[in-house]
Image (cartoon, rainbow, N blue to C red):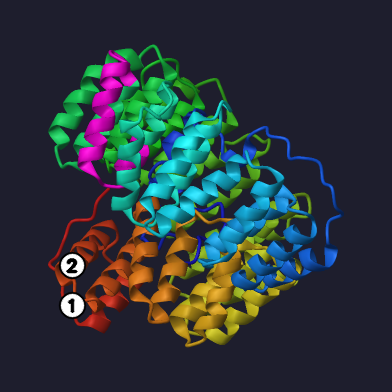
Amino acid sequence: MPMPVPVLSVAGTGRPRPRFRSLFRPGWLLLAVLSVAAPLPAQAARKAPPAVAPIPLEQVMAGEYALQAGQLADAAHWYLEAARAADGDVLLVERATRIALLANADAAPGKARALGRKRDPESLALRSATASLALREGRLRQARRELLRLAASPDPVAWHYALAALATGRDPAIVARAMDQMVDAGAVPGRLQAWQEFGRLSLRLDEPALSARIVDEMVRRFPGEPRVAVLRAGQLQLAGRNDEARAMLAQVEPQAAHDPEVRALVAVAYEALADFAAAARVMALGPQDTRTYSMRASLLARGDDHGILAGLYDELVAADRGRPDPARRMLLGRIAEFLERPAEALAWYRGVPGGPERAEARIRSAVALYELGRADEAWAEAHALQNDASSDGEARRNAYLLEGELRQRDDDAGGEIDALSRGLAAYPDDSALLYARALAWERQDRIERTEADLRKVLVADPENIAALNALGYTLADRTQRYQEALELIDRARTAEPDNAAIVDSYGWVLYRLGRSEEALVELRRAWGLLKDPEIGAHLGEVLWGLGRRDEAMRYFEESQRLEADNRSLRRALEKLQVTLPPAEPVP
């Protein structure tokens, strides 16, 4: 699936009116207010052994060229050759192993590990890769051995490598068995953070017995710890016991008033339950500033809770008197937009006195004018910013993106293309404008022009992940150039292997290549990373083709609840001649 166009407006969601809630995806709250995630294994402070042989540039360059072409198996081969020529250089071995795992190459990871052990037998990254490969191939005994060795390492970050290996396993049942065996062996470190991360992974695996065991062990080890109660609430939610999950969270709320971390965790747990009013109530505890007010407003908007949001709006209006804070006025304008008070929103945006928010306020003013039915004034506002030499280049560029977005909402396909083309005349080869125009061409079924614009982006920026993914997905979805699509998507997923949009694209091209079982694994993983209607539509179509129609219907219906008018969902249902009963959309 293509990634969203990078634009300041919230109007490009395909909905009939701008939604404040569309600024954030589910899970945004955790990212915004928590910095407690474990460091990535690659960030661990480990010194590689000094090189004893020069880096073989010929092989490294061949590996990079293959990688740039999306030929992962060839890239793994050449990096393996480079590592061999460099006498097992650890960094080259680790790169060869990572690429080989992405390519699902059979022999390369084993050869790379043999080289790495010769040079650095204690490498945590290579042990993690060994465990990961063993899990993928169903060799549970070897995986267990490597995971326990990692757990026994004195290095304080070794458990992160064990967790990373488990997270890359393909079969949830095999990963769950490996985790179960680690718990049996007492191999999970006795720190709350480690148990939290293992517990979260067990929830993602959808293995209720394992989740229950880990949470029970956490309760025993850390009695009275609110973070454990939050994890148990997540376990109850996955089991469909939402009332019990809410009761568990209610017990923790008093502690949230005095602990910002607990407050954020409880709010995120309520968000997962789609109880946005409760999440906003929890975020109202403790000191408030523009950021926390913004979080509360976003949660209430996602829950369509106009009454409470209107109360928050009135509270902020009262606090604004005599304090012309630009950020606060921007927030008030956005809330007014959601409450369908475009005249008030326009007044707030025009009242932004200056500073970095001023350009965005002008853009939002154009949206408010459009919502007031004053489209000509909206275009004039956008044009004024486009032609304002005193504004910075990014603001003027964004004004073209905004006009294109509003023209799209106005069902003016020609006007959308014209606005973006004028932007490209002013800012030749700008990647955001080219990307937006490419998606506009695709909506008009002008695939050859979509491809041309995305290739222009890649000429200037060969590593542009969004363009690589969008072009690969478009070729997979709208043409029969599947191998070319796969190579483009492989380039994108090498850079961002856990990006849900890219994983979805990878699964979709595998399906188009006739590799349905492999596609199903990847699409399930994408769905676990992001509940998106397009991903759900793809999952449903693959399952339908495999004859698993009841399961397919479940994903179709869930996608319909997320976005009833999703284009990928409509196309899948029409293709399969499936009719769904009407459903209320989720907030």
| 444 lies above or below 336 | below
Residue in the picture at 82% in, 46% down:
51
- Residue denoted by label 1: 578
Q: Is residue 231 left or right of residue 130?
A: left
Mark 1 falls on what kind of element? loop
Per the image, is 443 magenta?
no
The three-letter code of the residue at mark 1 reads Val
Instruction: Point out residue 139 in the picture as x, y percentages from the top left corner.
Output: 39, 55
Residue density around tag 2, few if under 14, some if 14–19, many if 20 or more, within 10 Å: many
Per the image, is 221 magenta?
yes
Q: Is residue 325 left or right of residue 193?
A: right
- Residue denoted by label 2: 553
Q: Nearer the viewer, residue 521 or 534?
A: 521
Residue in the picture at 50% in, 55% down:
499
| 511 lies above or below 255 | below
Q: Is residue 415 left or right of residue 504?
A: right
Q: Are marks 2 and 1 in contact (CB under 8 Å)?
A: yes
Query: Magenta residues, as a range?
Result: 199-226
